[in-house]
Each structure stands twice: as C-alpha cells, then as structure tokens.
Amino acid sequence: MKKIIIIFLLLSVALSQVTLTEEESKNIANNIIELQAQIDSLTTDTKLKTEEIDLLNKKVTSLEEELTLTEKKAKLVKPSWYENKWLYFGYGGILSYSIISILNALDDFF
C-alpha cells in the first residue's frame, strides 16, 4: 500500500511540472520588468504626493499665523476721526443750537 501511495505522489509531481517555451519565458520576464517600472513610478508618485501634503500643511500653518497676526493688528488700530461718537454728538449739539437760535431770530423778526 505504501508503495502505491509513493508511486502516485511521484507521478503527480512528475506530471504537474510545466515547461515553458522561450517565448513564454521572455514574455514573463518582460511583464516582470514592466511591473517593476510601474512600482518605481508609483513610489515616486507617492513620494511627490507626501511632499505636496507637507507643503500644504506648512501653508495652512502659515496662513493661520497670518490670521492671528491680522487679528492682533486689527485690535491695535485706532478709530479714525469720523468714527468718534463724541464728535457727532458735538456737531449735533452745535447744529441744533444754531437752528434754534436762527428760528428764534426769525420769530423775533416776523
């Protein structure tokens, strides 16, 4: 029984061997070379993309710093003369006083 099993194992190994022609082996070698070239191009693409991501992250951080600096700058800027409410109050008071005095003078005239 052991001899029969050994014979079957040897026959299965002997019959399962595949022989390739020269053309098939060259095609396989060419396919391997093409796949290696594709792998190299993909690795360079991924390297470039990681560098691009790093640059974009640096740009985001610099823009955030710029935003904080502009916010600080906006706090330091003083209002202009026309943004002062006391001037408007003073102009309104002077204008109302002058209108009232003109109306009183006209009332006395007529």
Image (cartoon, rainbow, N blue to C red):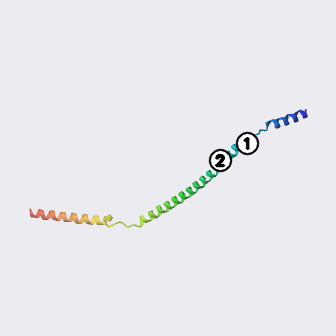
Identify which residue, 28 or 35, lies in the foreground.
28
Q: Which residue is mark 2?
A: 34
Q: Is residue 3 above or below residue 82?
A: above
| Mark 1 in CB contact with mark 2 (< 8 angstroms) | no
Disc 1 element? helix
Label number found at residue 22: 1
Asked where in the image residue 70 lies, by quadrant, the reply is bottom left
- 73 or 107, which lies in front? 73
Name which residue type carries label 2.
Glu
* Image position of 88 (left or right of 44): left
Q: Position of residue 72 (x, y in %)?
A: 45, 65
Element type at marker 2? helix
Looking at the image, residue 36 sits to the left or right of residue 16; the answer is left
Asked if residue 50 lies left or right of residue 78, the reply is right
In the displayed image of the protein, which residue is found farthest to the front? 22
Q: Earlier in the sequence, mark 1 or mark 2?
A: 1
Residue 49's image quarter? Answer: bottom right
Q: Nearer the viewer, mark 1 or mark 2?
A: 1
Residue at coordinates 21% horizontally, 65% vertically from top-left? 97
Residue type (three-letter) at the residue carrying disc 1: Glu
Residue at (70% x, 44% y) in the render? 26
Disc ID at residue 55: none
